[in-house]
Structures are given as structure tokens and as C-alpha cells.
Image: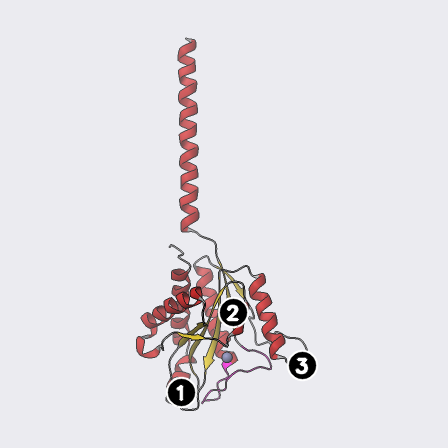
Amino acid sequence: MKTKKLREYVIIVLVATVCLLLMDLYTSINAKTRKVVTVVIDAGHGGKDGGAKGIDGTLEKDINLKIALKVQQVLQNEGIQVVMTRTADIQLCQGSYSKAEDMRIRQTIIDNGDASLAISIHQNSYSTERTRGAQVFCYRGSVEGKKAGVIFTEELEKIIGTENVRNVKEDGTLFMLKRIKCTGILIETGFITNWGEAALLNTDDYQNKLAEAIKNGVVRYLEIED
Ligand SMILES: [Zn+2]
């Protein structure tokens, strides 16, 4: 009788151990598929700093913010945590405008966000009207920046077409991308000095496409599984 009880006890302990191991395995698999990540979305310029002025009077700061807010939404829909440097038409420095101070505050927000990736959104401008196309910039010499730059360029090409995307560019003057603790890229989503692209950039449809491509870039670069 005693032996039977002992056997039952051993079986119960074994079953409980197996259950606990399976639960642990399930939790770790789940943790992999639902990796919690934070991304900083930085809408360039704002407030007194309008950024580039478009051929149709569009101000860069306004397009940057519209796209940034759409990116925030689609990333949050994927369960990704988003830190925004601004969500309204404001400059980040108090009092009189100082570019250096504005950049310093952006850098602080990015670093305090404990993020895996920071994406600055800007619009490009050029002296010739025909120049157009979205372009991703990374800091020259940053291996991770280049890797992200290539991925985001490809994801943009998939959604807005290769004819609307320029090659990824390594730039040695984008010091904020170098100074921040996490990997950073800057996306110029188009030229507001080109009539056709300025018109596109002002539409919800094109802004949504850009946001979707940027979200896909985040998911791919950070290897977030669905
Ligand atoms: Zn800009």
C-alpha cells in the first residue's frame, strides 16, 4: 500500500514538473514573438523652425509631423512602444529659438527613451525642381545605421516604388545620429521643391503609404515577429 502511494506521489510530482517546464517553454516562445521594443519617432523642425519651404508653400515641419503621427499610430497598432519628440507644431527649446538647443533636447528625449531605434522624419529641398525621391540617411561608419538604412530603403521601394526612392546615403555631418545611444536613421520622405512630390506628400494616402513602409522597416530591422 505504501509503495503504491509513493508511486502515485512520484507520478504527480513528475506530471507537475513536466507542466511547469511546458509553461516555461510556452512563455519563452511567447516572449520571442511579442518582443517589447521602443522606437523614437522624431518629427523634424517645428514651431519657429519651419524647415524647408515647398514649391507650393508647404512647410517641411507640417509634413514631418503628419507623417510622424501616422507612423506612431501604425507602430502602436503592432504593439511597438513609441516615444515622440513632438506631437504638435512646437519647437523643443524654450524662449528664443536655438538650433543647437533644439537638437540637444531631441537627443535627450531619444536617449531617455531607452529605444532600440530612432527615426527622424524630414522633407528634402533642392534648387532644381525636377529633383525628387525619398532617401534614407545614416551616419557614415555606423554598421547598424547602414543596415537599417538599406532595410528602410527596400521597404520604401516596395510600397512607393523604386522610381520614388533614392539610394541610401551615408552622411558624416548628421551628428545627432552619431551622438544618440541607439541606432538612428533620418528619412527625407521626399522633395517639397518638386511640384509632383509636394502634392503627393500633402495627401493622406501617400503619407499612409510612407508610414506603412516605415513600420515595415521597423518590424524587419528589429526582427519583430508577427
Ligand atoms: Zn529638415
Q: Position of residue 113 (x, y in %)?
A: 56, 61
- The mark nearer the N terminus, 1 or 3, is 3
Q: Residue at x 45, y 85 (%)?
A: 125
Q: Indicate the amino acid at tag 1.
A: Asn
Q: Nearer the viewer, residue 92 or 183?
A: 183
User: Is residue 80 rendered magenta in the image?
Assistant: no
67 over 219 or under it: above or below: below
Report the residue marked by disc 1.
194
Provide the residue span drawn in magenta: 45-60
Disc 1, SS: loop
The answer to whether residue 46 is above or below residue 222 is below
Element carrying mark 2? helix
Instruction: Give the residue displayed 43% in from the left and 24% down from the top.
Output: 13
Q: Residue under label 2, please give it.
A: 178
Mark 2 residue type: Lys
Q: Which quadrant of the figure contains the N terminus? A: top left
Q: Secondary structure at mark 3?
A: loop
Sort mark 2 into few (<14), some (14-19) or many (20+) by Cα contacts within 10 Å.
some
Tell me residue 63's x, y (percent): 48, 78
Q: Position of residue 84 (x, y in %)?
A: 54, 67
| Mark 3 vs 2, N-terminal side | 3
Q: CA distance from mark 3 to mark 2?
A: 26 Å
Look at mark 3 in the image and give the residue it sits on: 96
